[in-house]
Image (cartoon, rainbow, N blue to C red):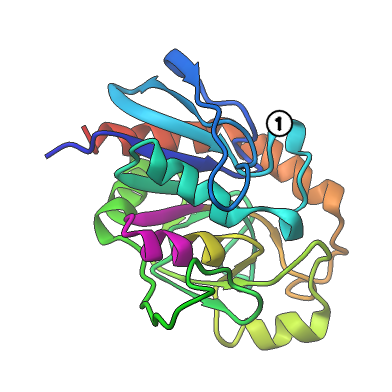
């Protein structure tokens, strides 16, 4: 059965731009505060979509200030059945080059992962949804993108980038590093929402190659990958009709 509504949390590559037909903004405040922006509900690729820019309009909210609990709760409240995220990441492996994509099948989150269970003892087991992961991977292949359909995402807190010593450790346990996906995946699992992420590889992490790492270099790759990222997400939506 086709999902009634697919929530999309747009990361840096999508920003706050995602074309929707019959678009309506949904203004709401959750028990955990306001989401990054009012979710926009409309149709895309024949599927009802609720689009929420993770960092808000004009990318104004830094990663360590994101209200992930409000974002996921808002999508659940307006009826999302599945949630797809797009995430900007750094590569922890020389073989995973900038400009490619990774669809993680697991993740590591050592620090400050949010929860809805602050006041009672609940031990949930987070996961990434296999059917959503397959839709993203197949759509990326159809778009002629370079994609890995498995991988481990390592989450750090931000906003700073990681040190060489941190990356030397992370590359032994993961494939890409970012600042948001593990939080979203954990909260989605607590809400019973199937979740998967399309990770854009926008740079080699600090120390993986000899070239210096700058934020402007990362942004250049994000901008270059934006159109392809939208194509892949739209292709995945087409598989969820």
Q: Is residue 152 magenta?
A: no
Could you tell me which quadrant the C terminus lies in?
top left
Work out whether residue 144 can be spotted.
Answer: no
**Position above or below: 222 against 125:** above
Which residue in the protein does label 1 denote?
Answer: 57
Residue 236 in the image: state x and y as whole percent. 33, 39
Residue at (22%, 38%) from the top-left corner?
A: 3
Residue numbers of the magenta segment: 185-198
Residue 77 horizontal side relative to residue 116, left or right: left
Q: Where does residue 22 sit, x and y in percent of width and height?
A: 41, 11
Q: Is residue 93 left or right of residue 115?
A: right
Tag 1's secondary structure? helix
Q: Residue at x 43, y 32 (%)?
A: 50
* Residue lying at 47% horizontally and 49% vertically, measured from the top left: 73
Which quadrant would the N terminus be assigned to in this image? top left
Q: Quadrant of residue 81?
A: top left
């Amino acid at each position: 059965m086709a999902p009634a509504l697919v929530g999309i949390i747009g990361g840096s590559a999508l920003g706050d731009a995602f074309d929707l037909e019959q678009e309506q903004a949904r203004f709401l405040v959750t028990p955990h505060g306001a989401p990054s922006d009012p979710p926009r509900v409309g149709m895309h690729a024949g599927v009802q979509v609720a689009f929420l820019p993770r960092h808000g309009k004009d990318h104004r909210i830094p990663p360590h200030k994101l209200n992930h609990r409000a974002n996921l709760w808002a999508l659940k409240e307006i009826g999302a059945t599945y949630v797809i995220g797009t995430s900007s990441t750094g590569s922890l492996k020389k073989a995973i080059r900038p400009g490619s994509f990774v669809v993680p099948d697991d993740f590591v989150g050592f620090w400050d992962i949010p929860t809805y269970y602050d006041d009672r003892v609940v031990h949930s087991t987070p996961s990434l949804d296999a059917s959503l992961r397959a839709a993203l991977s197949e759509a990326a292949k159809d778009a002629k993108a370079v994609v890995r359909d498995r991988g481990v995402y390592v989450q750090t807190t931000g906003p700073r980038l990681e040190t060489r010593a941190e990356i030397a450790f992370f590359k032994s346990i993961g494939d890409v590093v970012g600042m948001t996906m593990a939080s979203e995946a954990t909260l989605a699992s607590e809400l019973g929402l199937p979740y998967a992420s399309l990770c854009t590889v926008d740079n080699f992490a600090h120390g993986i190659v000899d070239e210096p790492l700058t934020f402007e270099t990362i942004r250049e790759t994000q901008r270059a990958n934006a159109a392809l990222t939208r194509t892949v997400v739209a292709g995945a939506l087409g598989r969820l009709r």
